Image: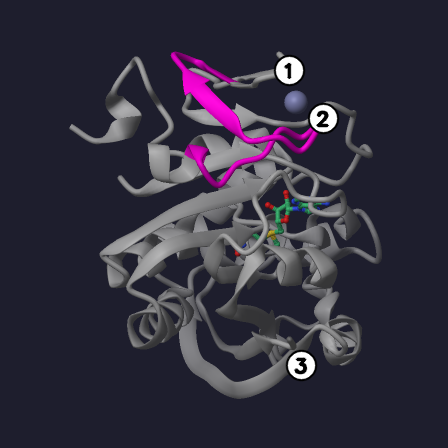
Amino acid sequence: MNAHEHGDDPLPPEIVRSLRCSVCGDPVGSAGRTVRCERGHSFDVAKQGYVNLLHARIPAGTADTAPMVAARVDLLASGAYLPLADELAKVASEHVQEGLIVDAGAGTGYYLAHVLDAAPGAHGLALDVSAVALRRAARAHPRASAAVWNLWEPWPVADRSASLILNVFAPRNAPQFHRVLTADGLLVVATPNPGHLRELGDLVISVDESKDTRLEETLGEHFSRVERREVTQQVKLSPSQIRQVVEMGPSAHHLHREGRRERLDGITASVDVTTSFSVTLYRPVP
Ligand SMILES: C[S@@+](CC[C@H](N)C(=O)[O-])C[C@H]1O[C@@H](n2cnc3c(N)ncnc32)[C@H](O)[C@@H]1O
Ligand SMILES: [Zn+2]
């Protein structure tokens, strides 16, 4: 039985000791389905296994919605992005065997689960604002836990507690990455490359291309880049996988424009597409 199937203490001690109260910053303890600090600030652990540490409302439109999460679950389950998961697991097996792995913007925990498989002594913490996604993340792996949090706020995680921070297509808060990572920890950022899914044209909004140039700038003063790996593969996507690729991301919000919905519905045969990602490794600047 893993900790998450255990009704009494859903969060393992390895995770609880790294969490901090999101109101006062004190350490927290776990009792039953509650996490609380000594001053009495308390947070519920949902029956689906994630803890909600938020004490303020998050801006509307920030979290991935249920339909986006559903499309992402199906697309990832098909193995279309497995080469990226394998590369992230390889990085972990080369660099991290134990300690805390924080996945910032973990979504459903798909990549975190692969990384935890490759780091048998480590525990994983998925942070995301989407409770719908975290229901999955909390169960993605026996050593994974999940907490609802807005990454733009100071994280409810202890200083220098993580040996690895994973960030896959998600917001990047460099000062928090730096504070939470141990001095010899590793930050691993995955981003899509400019040619990613190019065969799908404007059905997929390439939000990350401009972000990519900003990546070095935003991480610059806190991190130095040690390595960049490229993961590029041709994959054959079925019409339903193409729909999932579009609906799992921000492109879903633009389907009503310029006949995109009609063009998407008009795809009835598989398409060979390029998937292309960068996996970039950073060390914290002292
Ligand atoms: C493109 S998805 C990537 C999810 C996951 N890393 C994956 O690749 O499957 C971006 C994720 O960031 C989360 N997110 C967006 N803004 C956030 C914020 N301010 N704080 C926490 N999570 C956020 C979304 O809910 C979503 O799960
Ligand atoms: Zn407190």
Instruction: Name the one closer to the observer, 13 or 272.
Output: 13
Quadrant housing the C terminus: bottom right
Please tell me whether residue 163 is drawn above or below residue 100 in the rendered image. Answer: below
Q: Give the residue type that dot 2 points to.
A: Val
Give the secondary structure at mark 1: loop
- Residue 284: give x, y in percent of width and height: 60, 73
Report whether the residue tagged 1 is closer than 8 Å to ligand 2.
yes
Identified at 40% across, 34% down, the residue is 138
Above or below, 185 relative to 255: below
Residue type of the residue flagged with mark 1: Arg
Say which residue appears at 67% left-offset and 81% top-offset.
194
On whether ligand 2 comes within 8 Å of the CB at mark 2, the answer is yes
Residue 123 at x, y percent in the picture: 35, 47
Residue topped by disc 1:
39
**Alpha-carbon span between mark 2 and mark 1:** 10 Å
Classify 10 Å Cα crowding around label 3: few (below 14), some (14-19), many (20 and above): some
Judging depth in this view, the residue of 108 and 23 nearest the camera is 23
Q: Is residue 134 left or right of residue 257?
A: left
* Image mark for residue 23: 2
